[in-house]
Image (cartoon, rainbow, N blue to C red):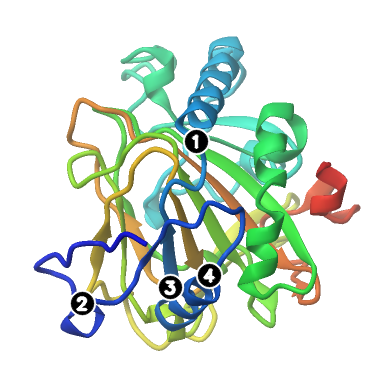
Amino acid sequence: AALLRPMRWMPAALRGKRSLSTSVIKGLSKADQEFLHENGYLVVKGFTSQKKCEALKQQLNKLIDDFDPSSSTSVFSTHESKRDYQDTYFLESGDKVRFFWEEDAFAEDGTTLQYPKRECINKVGHALHIKDQIFRDYCSSLAQVASDIGMQKPIPLQSMYICKSPRTGGEVGPHQDSTFLYTDPPSVHGLWLSIDSAGLDNGCLWVVPGSQDTPIQKRFVRTNETDTTGLKMIDNERTVEELSTKGGVALPTESGDLVILHGQVVHWSEKNTSGLSRHALMLHVVDGASEYSSENWLQHEGGIKEFPSFEDLK
């Protein structure tokens, strides 16, 4: 297996450790599982072919091209203080394919796009794995990976295609995925496919190895404090004012690499300052053996129905 050359910001304790898998099967080796358990993340090199990545990208571009910009002005903000907590378009996207704009997508009039439409979309979600056959086929292939993580009953919860385009692709601050997809006991893992190659210039992932032991600081939940359902961020096991990025390492990836992220590991990405896109597809999976909170923002058909399983995707 290939090794990641230690970078100058990599903690000495991690140097020489095997952080990259080159397994050709669609699952994880024992060494992969041990590294993931110890460090809270794993990079699987060449998990998916570049041909498949290109097919996913082409399908995403088709979906964007067919999308009517006047049908929504929902902006996805990576900054907690700027989020619209009453955005029903976002709130009801758990079983739909919906489009979310970058913060600076629109001109001052609020309706005119400042850049080409493809470059103005922040992400598309959150049920691509259910509603679109091309994305469904890929996501269903991740069942063995989810099982190898240690899940008794893996459930593909949400999918989102993140564009992070040149000029408009903003930073995503340090966070824990369990904040948004809480189960008891905690079980969520992110399966992040690098559609484009990702490096320091175009906003690759960063992670703090070993930070999966950090308690879940906050939770993003539904609230009925007004006449309509809204969203709010609440404290959970708050132990720090802000999540620390000390000891963080960059995870440069090539097209087709898969990054697995424990739900409590601290991770983030910087702004895309290059002229290249940094497309990625994220599938979040949880263990159906854990209790999925009815307070979570993401619900399937408003919480009336359970999320489809991997078997349902076949």
Looking at numbered disc 3 in the image, what kind of residue is underneath it? Val
| First reached walking from the N terminus: tag 2 or tag 4 | 2
Camera-nearest label, 1 or 4: 1
Residue 151 in view = yes
Q: Position of residue 160 (x, y in %)?
A: 57, 41
Tags 1 and 4 touching, CB below 8 Å = no
Amino acid carrying label 2: it is Arg
Could you say whether the residue bearing mark 2 is in a helix, strand or loop? Answer: loop
Q: Which mark is residue 15?
A: 2
Name the residue furthest left. Answer: 8
Mark 2 vs 1, N-terminal side: 2
The residues tagged by marks 1 and 3 sit, at their Cα atoms, a distance apart of 27 Å
Q: Nearer the viewer, residue 148 or 66?
A: 148
Of badges 1 and 3, the one in the foreground is 1
What residue would you read off at disc 1? 49
| Alpha carbon distance from label 4 to label 3 | 6 Å
Category of crowding for the residue at label 2, using alpha-carbon neighbours closer than 10 angstroms: few (below 14), some (14–19), many (at least 20): some
1 or 3: tag closer to the N-terminus: 1
**What number is the disc on residue 265?**
3
Above/below status of 193 relative to 237: above
What number of labels is visible?
4
The percent position of residue 99, horizontal first and vertical second, equals 57, 29
Q: Describe the element under mark 1 as helix, strand or loop.
A: loop
In this rendered view, identify the residue nearer to me: 45 or 143: 45
On screen, residue 35 versus residue 143, left or right, reads left
Q: Which residue does the image show at 49% across and 80% down from the upper left? A: 34
Viewport quadrant of the N terminus:
bottom left
Q: Does the residue at mark 2 contact the one at mark 4 (Cβ under 8 Å)?
A: no
Q: Nearer the viewer, residue 269 or 225?
A: 269
**Mark 4 highlights which residue?**
263
Asked if the residue under mark 3 is in contact with the one under mark 4, i.e. CB atoms within 8 Å, the reply is: yes
